[in-house]
Image (cartoon, rainbow, N blue to C red):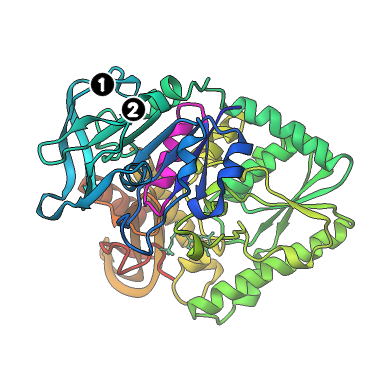
Amino acid sequence: MDKILVMDFGGQYNQLIARRVRSEHVYAEIKAYSRITVEEIKENGYSGIIFTGGPNSVYDSSSPHYDKAILDLGIPVLGICYGHQLTAYMAGGKICSAGSISEYGKVNLKIKKNNPLFDGIPEESICWMSHTDYVNEIPEGYEVTAVTDVCPCAAMANEKKNIYSVQFHPEVTHTEYGQKLLHNFIFNVCGCKGEWFMDDFMKKSVEEIRAKVKDGKVLLALSGGVDSSVCAALLAEAIGKQLTCVFVDHGMMRKNEGNEVEEAFSKWDINFVRVNAGERFLGKLKGVTDPETKRKTIGEEFIRVFEEESKKIGSVDYLAQGTIYPDVIESGLGDSATIKSHHNVGGLPDYVDFKEIIEPLRLLFKDEVRELGRELGLPDYLVERQPFPGPGLGIRVIGEITEEKLSMLKEADAIFREEVGKNRLANQYFAVLTNTFSVGVMGDDRTYGYTVALRSVTTDDFMTADWTRLPYEVLEKASSRITNEVKGITRIVYDITSKPPATVEWE
Ligand code: XMP
């Protein structure tokens, strides 16, 4: 299979580059520049290398550099932004500060010299720039292939060596022909075939899982979220009865969620254990109002229940986890790079007696996980599911959690999700049951009930998020339905804080 190396120099769009490449059905992997040597690059058989952008200037003493032997490997290279400047620098060119002519945002790009990278791209188009340095002297053997009104080298190429670089960012959608340029690099320059397809991935993974697990037993903690559900479906396809999914229903799932999860997995011949532990969790949470204590209590209880169940199953060889690619990328500027270890359900492994952890989704981005889920026949409501925190509605009921409050919130939340979901207006949207009471009137009677806050955010990565400007009609419909259909709720407010300063969740 063709592979493209995305060499990360600390750029904020590195994941986007890999995703854009993969959308052309070519596998791309991201490696921090400091974590791969020229030798390893050679051994890995990459079809092409993309240098990402980065926050540094090539002349800073601390800026990330690379062995210039990389340009003599005969592997096609595409440098982007800092990667463009670094390519020029490594090949003997000069870079200088752009000063007052720094470019940021949409800029008119003019192609000066056509080449395989610009195939099908008009002479003038819009590109997206973000740079404070520029290449002012190109290296020997290279030629300037595009300019902007102020940037004398917006792109350069050494066609003989298959080395190309661009000052702009083809990976962001603001660059009109960005995807086309990446397509050209991958196919025209690198000669890739485009063989990265989810059905192939599925078949290969199934074979690999079978070969590894042989007749062993695999245990998976199924949370009902997208990643663990797809992981479960893949394992179910591969090893059937050797898989046990333990689905701990802590009673704080969304409306109908527990049944939906159970139903989706009934089509496979696997061991599916649903533990209805709602009462047990609520018992532990009695009187608990502090958000951190709630989270800890739910997390710990989850582990206890899972532990008990796995003991009942006995002698498990493998623990499976739904870790996905963004959780394992060794990224960033090298020394400070950290590898996140992520659990769908926090802190599971230590106590289960198992040989190894298996993570069949570790190569996939979220959108690919969804695609694989569909390939495996999981229903849309599971595959398209928005993120849902492990502690569930427990952190969306403010104050003490009770059965009554949970049931009100489940109804209100289902209505709001139905109304917003009709038009796919936001990335995450839910209801929160606040601890505030207010007076209302219904018919001739005075009511005194809960205030529900509606929360809807638009975001790429959930690290930052904007509150969604939902149409008034959607808010009106949700408000009117909730107050009419859910007893005990008298008032609806809409949360208009972004992250930061707020977080997405209320607790
Ligand atoms: P915050 O509230 O931190 O949320 O802005 C960012 C995203 O993370 C989700 N979230 C969690 N997910 N376990 C999870 O698996 C948790 O404990 C948890 N807390 C928050 C939240 O729903 C949002 O998508």
Q: Say which residue label 2 marks.
A: 181
Residue positioned most to the top: 120
| In front of the other: 347 or 141 | 141
Residue ID at (32%, 62%): 60
Q: Say which residue label 1 marks.
A: 121
Visible residue check, residue 474 = yes
Q: Is residue 484 left or right of residue 327?
A: left
Q: Is residue 7 above or below residue 251?
A: above
Residue ID at (62%, 53%): 223
How far apart, in angstroms, are the residues tagged by discs 2 and 1?
8 Å
Dot 2 and dot 1 residues touching (CB under 8 Å): yes
Please tell me how crowded label 1 is: few (under 14), some (14-19), or many (20+) other residues with Cα within 10 Å: some
Residue ID at (29%, 43%): 93
Q: Residue 375 sits in which quadrant?
A: top right
Q: Is residue 408 left or right of residue 111?
A: right
Please tell me how crowded label 2 is: few (under 14), some (14-19), or many (20+) other residues with Cα within 10 Å: many
Q: Which residues are magenta?
A: 9-26
Q: Secondary structure at mark 2?
A: helix
